Image (cartoon, rainbow, N blue to C red):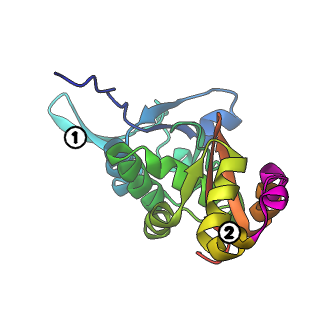
């Protein structure tokens, strides 16, 4: 029996020319990680063959003035809801886009990291977060399982009339104070504050 696989789309970012934006025009382009890498390495300039001669042309816009159109900003992300601001560290962003293209769960690790560390999305750190993070769809079940793992003997020693009255959702709410969380739909990704 063949398994249905969802084809994942490549991460993309929209990189805009800031000089054009300041002139009232929106010029730029959507780029994959590989395209962004090439543009970054070439300082946003392509060598283009025109009438048998090579000339420099801006990648992000059609301006003739090469020198004054060298600033950029990322105006949009197509990375499963992850947004990292207008001026991220491009080499880290490229590496992160490659990670997410390989395994979409990296987007949740990056979002979790970004939500509590606001700007750190170094690929090595994102990989550490992915290894250490967990997820749940029901906070009360998560809290109960976590407490049973940590305090199995103590919970078993409680009489049923006490253990049966535990509000596991409230316990989960209290436990979350020791965790960084990031919600996507009905799933919550979490990592203990001591893990990073």
Position of residue 157 in the picture relative to residue 184 (left or right): right
Q: Nearer the viewer, residue 157 or 31?
A: 157
Mark 1: secondary structure:
strand
Residue 38: numbered disc: none
User: Residue at horizontal 47%, vertical 69%?
Assistant: 128
- Quarter of the image with the C terminus is bottom right
- Quarter of the image with the N terminus is top left
Region of the chain picked out in magenta, as a range = 158-171
Q: CA distance from mark 1 to mark 2?
A: 78 Å
User: Residue at horizontal 49%, vertical 33%?
Assistant: 63
- Residue 174 in the image: state x and y as whole percent: 83, 62
183 above or below 124?
Answer: above
Position of residue 80 in the picture relative to residue 115 (left or right): left
Residue 156: numbered disc: 2
Q: Earlier in the sequence, mark 1 or mark 2?
A: 1
- Residue 102 in the image: state x and y as whole percent: 32, 47
Magenta-drawn stretch contains 150? no
User: Residue at horizontal 76%, vertical 60%?
Assistant: 176
Q: Quadrant of residue 152?
A: bottom right
Can you identify the residue that label 1 sits on?
A: 54
Q: Are marks 1 and 2 in contact (CB under 8 Å)?
A: no
3 above or below 84?
Answer: above
* Residue density around tag 1, few if under 14, some if 14–19, many if 20 or more, within 10 Å: few
Q: Nearer the viewer, residue 122 or 15?
A: 122
- Residue 49 in the image: state x and y as whole percent: 20, 34
Q: Quadrant of residue 52?
A: top left
- Residue 85 in the image: state x and y as whole percent: 65, 49
12 above or below 91?
Answer: above
Would you say residue 48 is visible in this rendering?
yes
């Amino acid at each position: 029996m063949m398994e249905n696989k969802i084809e994942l789309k490549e991460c993309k970012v929209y990189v805009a020319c800031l000089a054009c934006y300041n002139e009232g025009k929106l010029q730029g382009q959507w780029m994959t990680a590989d395209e962004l890498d090439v543009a970054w390495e070439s300082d946003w300039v392509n060598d283009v063959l025109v009438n048998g001669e090579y000339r420099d042309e801006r990648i992000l816009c059609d301006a003739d003035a090469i020198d004054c159109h060298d600033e950029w900003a990322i105006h949009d992300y197509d990375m499963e809801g992850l947004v990292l601001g207008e001026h991220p560290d491009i080499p880290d962003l490229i590496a992160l886009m490659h990670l997410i293209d390989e395994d979409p769960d990296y987007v949740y690790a990056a979002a979790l990291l970004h939500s509590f560390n606001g700007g750190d999305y170094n690929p090595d750190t994102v990989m550490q977060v992915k290894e250490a993070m967990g997820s749940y769809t029901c906070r009360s079940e998560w809290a109960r399982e976590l407490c049973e793992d940590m305090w199995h003997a103590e919970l078993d020693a409680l009489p049923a009339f006490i253990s049966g009255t535990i509000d596991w959702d409230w316990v989960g709410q209290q436990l979350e104070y020791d965790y960084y969380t990031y919600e996507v739909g009905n799933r919550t990704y979490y990592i203990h504050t001591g893990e990073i």
